[in-house]
């Protein structure tokens, strides 16, 4: 009896700080964002409930920007995601084949973006692709007699996709290389003795064995790309003329740039709902149990 | 013969992907330490004039500001956030490693759940939450909000360290009459010092690097290093040399921490050793 009551107290004592912090900064905000979405909260923080006005504005296309933003978001997610997964697989398969020092150098180059603050990573891209002759790539081209190219006007989306995609690659590459390293060497050796080429070994031996990491990384980065807007905000700010404005960034800009907090919240609510649906699907597909390690012995 | 040829192709492909990044990194470092550049990446003259912000003022809006006050603010912000992450994670990690309770599955899958409803898309709500609790525009409140983002991964990290401690130590302490809290405090904390260090650095690093929380939730009159760099980029006349130098100054402390305590960090099972990273 005494043991039971002690146990009850003890685990709640240990868990309460994280429960408090997480519910205060995640679960209450979810409720709050749903509430604000039904108000007309503005810059002086005066508000009243306005019902579905914000959502009607979103879904009946009263906002002329919405179709464009949906198109941008779809292009962004479905280009950055394949770039991340295929790029990371490609790099980790290639670095596996070369000697240790060289592969470490290459991995360091591709991992460096993770160690950089977002602001600096954004600054590097902004500066490298600047349209004047002071941009890094333009000044290199100038040396070859090419006149400056206005990268951000010609293909802003491509720059944003690469900046985010290579950030994704740095994490996925790390996971994939460690997974490849844990595959027993016998498999690849056996395939090579049978005369399999590099492509065949990768396609029929390694990639099937990497099914699980590839699936988790795809799910993880799908959510990242749906939710993230920080790098786009830093590199282009959504411009030029909303060319790189994605759904999440549009929500942020509506709230903190145009001071339409109610409308911004309703945009974010759509994202929260999409994410929750995705989460349920993923948990069903992967199985909650598989992510969990039980304690070995019950004390 | 064919094998050697294959190797060369691999090197060439990898180099082609890596070269644009190398150019960017080199341009960044070279720009910080030189007066001007030719061909984008070749520094013309070695100079430390870009680093004059260390002892003189920086234009900030219509006024001027000094780097060291901003540095201290950033340090305060990152330390509070790191400490909060450490305290919360060491407590929770112990419970998840050693105690069976209902709802444990939920706690362990929190990483994925909180990644789905990430702090970034709840930022509007967090803004109003802090506004109504009078924590908005104050460094400690924003640091706590930032700390909540790192808890799921931090818990996985520290749980690995707790898992590695033998159960016999805990049992013998219990036989001697320790309570759970005493076990945690007197037995476990000294044993998992590297883990505590790793989690603190984890929390510190991400708070130090954070941009969007700081930019949105702290007023423009209290710049941290990240918002300072962004603010300088957003001005009319951009001096890339100075921005590169400040960025370098901004990046150094965490890199030092990281290199200095690398041994402890490398011991950390960073991804929790499970599928979900």
Image (cartoon, coloured by chain):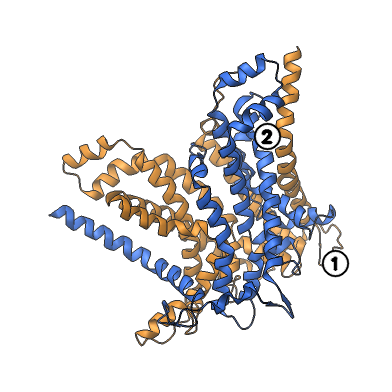
Chain colours: A orange, B blue
Above or below, B93 against B24 in this view is above
What secondary structure is found at the residue carrying circle 2?
A: helix
Q: Quadrant of the C terminus of chain A?
A: top right
Foreground pick, B60 / A22: B60
Q: Is residue B241 left or right of residue A208?
A: right
Above or below, A173 against B157 in this view is below
Foreground pick, B55 / A60: B55
- Circles 1 and 2 in contact, beta carbons < 8 Å: no
Chain of the residue under label 1: A
The residue depicted at 70 percent of the width and 45 percent of the height is B84
Give the residue at the far left of this rendering: B1
Chain of the residue under label 2: B
Q: Marks 1 and 2, Cα distance to the nearest angstrom?
A: 41 Å
Quarter holding residue B73: bottom right
Coordinates of residue B258 in the picture (x, y in percent): 53, 52
Coordinates of residue A42 in the picture (x, y in percent): 81, 65
Determine if residue A68 is in view. no
Nearer to us of marks 1 and 2 is 2
The residue depicted at 61 percent of the width and 61 percent of the height is A247
Coordinates of residue A235 in the picture (x, y in percent): 56, 70
Q: Quadrant of the N terminus of chain A?
A: top right
Q: Is residue A74 left or right of residue B87?
A: left
The residue depicted at 51 percent of the width and 76 percent of the height is A152
Q: Which mark is residue B91?
A: 2
Give the residue at the far front of this rendering: B55
The residue depicted at 51 percent of the width and 62 percent of the height is A76
What secondary structure is found at the residue carrying circle 1?
A: loop
Give the residue at the far top of this rendering: A1
Residue annotated with mark 1: A44
Above or below, A291 against A141 in this view is above
Judge if badges 1 and 2 mark residues of a common chain. no
């Amino acid at each position: 009896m005494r043991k039971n009551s002690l146990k009850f107290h003890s685990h709640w004592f240990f868990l309460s700080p994280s429960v408090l912090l997480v519910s205060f900064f995640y679960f209450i905000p979810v409720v709050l964002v749903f509430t604000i979405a039904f108000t007309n909260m503005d810059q002086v923080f005066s508000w009243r409930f306005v019902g579905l006005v914000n959502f009607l504005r979103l879904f009946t296309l009263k906002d002329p920007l919405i179709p464009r933003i949906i198109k941008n978001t779809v292009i962004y997610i479905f280009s950055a995601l394949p770039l991340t997964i295929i790029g990371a697989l490609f790099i980790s398969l290639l670095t596996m084949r070369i000697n240790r020092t060289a592969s470490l150098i290459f991995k360091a180059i591709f991992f460096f973006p993770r160690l950089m603050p977002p602001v600096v990573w954004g600054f590097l891209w902004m500066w490298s692709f600047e349209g004047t002759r002071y941009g890094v790539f333009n000044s290199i081209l100038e040396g070859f007699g090419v006149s400056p190219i206005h990268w951000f006007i010609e293909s802003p989306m491509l720059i944003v996709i690469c900046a985010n995609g290579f950030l994704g690659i740095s994490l996925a590459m790390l996971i994939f290389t460690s997974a490849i390293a844990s595959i027993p060497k016998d498999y690849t050796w056996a395939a090579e003795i049978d005369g399999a080429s590099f492509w065949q070994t990768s396609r029929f031996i390694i990639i099937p064995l990497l099914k699980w990491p590839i699936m988790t990384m795809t799910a993880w980065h799908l959510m990242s790309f749906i939710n993230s807007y920080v790098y786009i905000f830093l590199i282009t700010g959504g411009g030029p003329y909303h060319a790189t404005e994605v759904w999440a960034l549009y929500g942020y800009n509506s709230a903190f740039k145009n001071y339409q907090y109610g409308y911004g919240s309703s945009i974010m609510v759509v994202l929260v709902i999409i994410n929750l649906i995705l989460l349920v699907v993923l948990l069903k597909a992967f199985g909650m149990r598989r992510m969990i390690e039980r304690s070995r012995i019950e004390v | 013969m064919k094998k050697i040829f294959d190797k060369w192709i691999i090197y060439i492909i990898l180099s082609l992907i890596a070269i644009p990044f190398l150019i960017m990194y080199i341009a960044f470092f070279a720009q910080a330490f030189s007066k001007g550049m030719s061909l984008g990446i070749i520094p013309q003259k070695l100079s430390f004039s870009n680093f004059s912000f260390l002892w003189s003022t920086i234009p900030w809006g219509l006024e001027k500001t000094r780097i060291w006050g901003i540095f201290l603010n950033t340090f305060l912000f990152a330390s509070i956030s790191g400490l909060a992450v450490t305290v919360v994670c060491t407590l929770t990690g112990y419970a998840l490693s050693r105690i069976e309770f209902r709802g444990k599955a939920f706690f362990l899958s929190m990483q994925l759940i909180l990644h789905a409803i990430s702090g970034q898309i709840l930022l509007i709500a967090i803004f109003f939450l802090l506004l109504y609790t009078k924590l908005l525009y104050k460094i400690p409140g924003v640091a706590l909000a930032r700390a909540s983002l790192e808890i799921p991964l931090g818990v996985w990290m520290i749980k690995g360290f707790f898992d590695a401690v033998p159960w016999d130590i805990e049992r013998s302490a219990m036989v001697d009459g320790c309570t759970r809290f005493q076990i945690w405090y007197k037995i476990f904390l000294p044993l998992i010092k590297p883990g505590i260090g790793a989690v603190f650095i984890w929390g510190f690093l991400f708070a130090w690097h954070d941009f969007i929380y700081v930019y949105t939730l702290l007023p423009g009159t209290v710049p941290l290093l990240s918002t300072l760099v962004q603010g300088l980029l957003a001005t009319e006349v951009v001096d890339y040399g100075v921005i590169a130098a400040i960025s370098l100054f901004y990046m150094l402390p965490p890199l030092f921490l990281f290199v200095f305590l690398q041994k402890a960090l490398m011991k950390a099972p960073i991804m929790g050793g499970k599928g979900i990273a």
